Image: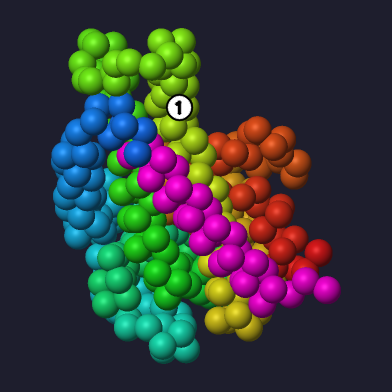
Amino acid sequence: MATLYTHQGSNNRKTWFLMSGFFIVVIFIGWAVSWYFQSPILLYVAVAFSILMNVFSYWYSDKIVLKMAGAKKVKREEYFDLWNIVENLSITAGLPMPKVYIINDPAPNAFATGRDAEHGVVAVTTGLLGMLNKTELEGVIGHELSHIGNKDILISTIVVVLVGFVTLLSDFFLRATFWGVGNRRQGGDGRAGLIMLLIGVGLAILAPLIATVIKLAISRKREFLADASGALLTRYPEGLASGLEKISGYSGELKRANHATAHLYIADPFKDKNPKKVSFMHKLFLTHPPVQERVDALRGK
């Protein structure tokens, strides 16, 4: 019989499997570009640019996200009950007390950010505080603290670097091919060279899409893992399950919802009516698993 522990282990394995697949895609594209242009230096420049761009995002991601969300830092005396829940669960999880932020929005939602446990941030909306009872709020906070404890921010940053790298290389390859730049390895069978070129162009077009699909798949797996970890932290899976049902039942959207940060929230800030059954193709492009699947996993169904 499946338990929270087996779900946690399974999702961890699947996440690292997807990450490994990501690295294989990156290595293959890098090799293809180097082979086509016979200039490894171009690959090194692309890698360096992508890493530098994303290191900046990593160090300042929390400030950027909080600004985009319109979140405001609060003190214990302003939201005493929320602060105590965050503090008590942080102690239980063995994590430093994160900063607490509030988003003035009637839509119930929450997210965690920060580059590591020492710089953790938990943000919740006023709508979430007004809708959930104490055990449900503990479930949501446990989920967000699990994102910090599971180092999801670090993994997300690695994924962003890889997606940026794949997109950059693909765009460079397509532009150079269109303008006829580069050494096309003269000699040999011309038809074979043309076939290789067509395959390369096809992969360059599809690579960013494939990379995005993998990124979203990793995001969904991390949500399942945070659900399991959060339930283990509070020792009451029903609290989070009930909280997710209430959040998904709200019909409105976040006022400052943004596609760039949608994957950070506990529930998709862009409402999709949360159908119980979602087609395979539709699921590929979701930032979050269907709520019913998450609730069923928490309840051991």
Q: Residue at x 56, y 67 (%)?
A: 12
Residue ID for mark 1: 203
Mark 1: secondary structure: helix
Q: Residue at x 36, y 33 (%)?
A: 32
Q: Is residue 107 magenta?
A: no
Q: Is residue 5 magenta?
A: yes
In the drawing, does residue 216 fall left or right of residue 76? right
In the drawing, does residue 207 fall left or right of residue 278? left
Q: Position of residue 225 (x, y in %)?
A: 57, 66
Q: Amino acid at mark 1?
A: Leu
92 is higher (above) or lower (below) than 210: below
In the drawing, does residue 177 fall left or right of residue 284? left
Q: Position of residue 112 (x, y in %)?
A: 38, 63
Q: Nearer the viewer, residue 236 or 199?
A: 199
Q: Residues within 10 Å of mark 1 (few under 14, many from 20)?
A: some
**Where's the N terminus, which quadrant?**
bottom right
**Where's the C terminus, which quadrant?**
bottom right
Q: Residue at x 49, y 35 (%)?
A: 210
277 is higher (above) or lower (below) than 113: above
Task: Name the chief secondary structure element in magenta.
Answer: helix
Q: Is residue 268 visible?
A: no
Q: Position of residue 255 (x, y in %)?
A: 39, 40
Residue furthest to the front: 188
Q: Residue at x 36, y 73 (%)?
A: 79
Q: Position of residue 150 (x, y in %)?
A: 45, 72
Q: Nearer the viewer, residue 75 or 63?
A: 63
The span shown in magenta is 1-30
139 is higher (above) or lower (below) than 233: above
